[in-house]
Image (spheres, helix red, strand yellow):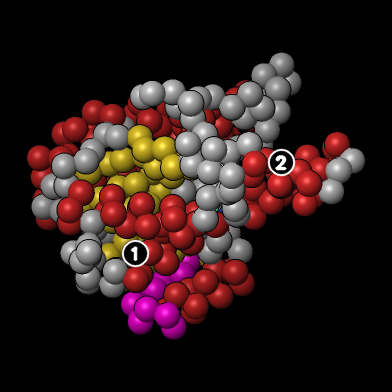
Amino acid sequence: MDMGLKGKKAIVCAASKGLGRGCAEALAREGVDLVICARGAEALEEAANAIRARTGVRITAIACDITTPEGREAVLDACPEPDILVNNAAGPPPGDFKTFTLDDWRAAVEANMLTPIALIQATVYGMMERGFGRVVNITSGAVKAPIPVLELSNGARAGLTGAVAVIARKAVKHNVTINGLLPGAFDTDRLRSVIRKTAEAQGLSEEIVAAERAASSPAGRFGRPEEFGAACAFLCSAHAGYITGQNILIDGGAYPGLL
Ligand code: NAD
């Protein structure tokens, strides 16, 4: 299927690895020029070079922390009028409600709620004027079913989901959509580091912990970043202009509810 995206411009945040990279790769395959960012310059350059070599699209790589005003300014300077915005940043750490400080909550809200809101506010009105725009917020399955040890994430991501629900419905008349993509367990560095810590804490091997976790999914495996990227590319495509304000789980069937 031709996604109708050739020559469009996208900002993909936090894209040197994992889910952000999966989205960047999938959009580049559709001929989308990219501005990508990540915190570490080396992995970011490696990703930019690899994607450029495979697809031939123009890629600008900005090493920055997207959760800071300076990071957002650098990315927006490089691409002031994106057609596509994929919001992403590392999730908050696990912990317990009893010991979280207000600063912990502020950091989670800053990274996973206010940062995407700021980028949407800076770009969505231009998209509406130009008559095309796609925003995908990478959030978490926690939006549908809160995860016990990730209360900071549950709160910040639910906040973002509520915050964009109205603008998603105002923008769609202008062929601009805003949707959430909610990952379950995907095989990325983040998942592997959680597995490593669990294995250490339980005195088990990483292989055993990973195999048990994968087997607990109805799919019997972890998701692959390229599967996530393909879904993102479809939501960004010319064909998806009637899908807005939705929060779409990609979790191999892990969420047990009907809706
Ligand atoms: P990852 O650790 O594999 O990749 C993170 C990427 O984001 C790297 O390129 C890193 O440089 C970049 N990055 C992180 N914070 C950044 C920042 N502040 N500014 C710029 N770049 C930044 O992570 P992932 O597994 O791809 O996760 C992406 C998001 O999805 C996270 O918010 C994570 O919590 C969420 N999530 C992941 C899973 C999963 O199973 N992988 C499940 C649910 C939610």
Please tell me whether residue 248 belongs to the stretch shown in magenta.
Answer: no
At label 2, the amino acid type is: Glu
Does the residue tagged 2 have its C-beta within 8 Å of any atom of ligand 1?
Answer: no
Query: Closer to the camera, 16 or 124?
Result: 16
Residue 143 location (% of width, % of height): 46, 29
* Farthest top residue in view: 98
Name the residue at 44% across, 42% down: 250
Relative to 142, residue 124 above or below: below
Residue 81 location (% of width, % of height): 24, 59
- Give the quarter of the figure containing the N terminus: bottom left
Relative to 62, residue 119 above or below: above
Does the residue tagged 1 have its C-beta within 8 Å of any atom of ligand 1?
Answer: no
Residues rendered magenta in the picture? 53-62
Where residue 212 is drawn, which disc sits there? 2
At label 1, the amino acid type is: Leu
Query: Secondary structure beneath disc 1?
Result: helix
Q: Residues within 10 Å of mark 1 (few under 14, many from 20)?
A: many
Task: Report the residue marked by disc 1.
Answer: 27
Query: Secondary structure beneath disc 2?
Result: helix
Question: Left or right: 96 with respect to 125?
Answer: right
Question: Left or right: 206 with respect to 250?
Answer: right
Please tell me whether residue 59 belongs to the stretch shown in magenta.
Answer: yes
Residue 38 location (% of width, % of height): 53, 60
Residue 72 location (% of width, % of height): 43, 53
Name the residue at 71% across, 16% down: 98
Name the residue at 32% across, 61% down: 10
* Farthest right residue in view: 203
Q: Earlier in the sequence, mark 1 or mark 2?
A: 1
